[in-house]
């Protein structure tokens, strides 16, 4: 998933705060989910919400 420009800064802040570096939020979400739901629960919740908002924004813009 490519992060739209309108969401780019928000995602970059998340990456800086968490120490992750994956530019694809969907790929990062799957990676974290496969590692451990308990360890990364907060990050998984944030990424799930973020991916949903990006997808809604793309549908609304179409």
Image: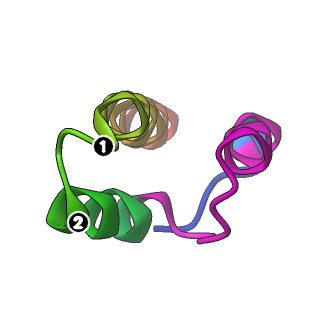
Looking at the image, which is closer to me, 61 or 40?
A: 40
Q: Name the residue that disc number 2 marks.
A: 35
Looking at the image, which is closer to me, 2 or 13?
A: 13
Within 10 Å of disc 1 (Cα), the crowding (few <14, some 14-19, many 20+) is few
Magenta part of the chain: 8-25
Asked which colour scheme the image uses, the reply is: rainbow
In three-dimensional space, the C-alpha distance between marks 1 and 2, rounded to whole angstroms, equals 8 Å
Q: Residue at x 17, y 45 (%)?
A: 37
Taking 32 as reference, is 11 left or right? Answer: right
Q: Quadrant of the C terminus?
A: top left
The x, y position of residue 38, in whole percent, is 20, 38
Looking at the image, which is closer to me, 27 or 17?
A: 17
Helix, strand or loop at label 1? It is loop
The x, y position of residue 40, in whole percent, is 34, 43
Instruction: Check if mark 1's residue and mark 2's residue have beta carbons within 8 Å.
Output: yes
Taking 35 as reference, is 14 left or right? Answer: right
Q: Name the residue that disc number 1 marks.
A: 39
Q: Residue at x 70, y 55 (%)?
A: 19
The x, y position of residue 29, in whole percent, is 33, 56
Q: Is residue 40 above or below residue 45?
A: below
Residue 50 has which mark? none
Q: Quadrant of the N terminus?
A: bottom left
């Amino acid at each position: 998933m490519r992060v739209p420009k309108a969401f780019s800064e928000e995602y970059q802040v998340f990456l800086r705060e968490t120490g992750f570096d994956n530019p694809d939020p969907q790929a990062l979400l799957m990676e974290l989910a496969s590692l451990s739901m308990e360890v990364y629960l907060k990050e998984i919740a944030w990424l799930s919400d973020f991916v949903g908002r990006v997808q809604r924004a793309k549908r609304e813009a179409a």
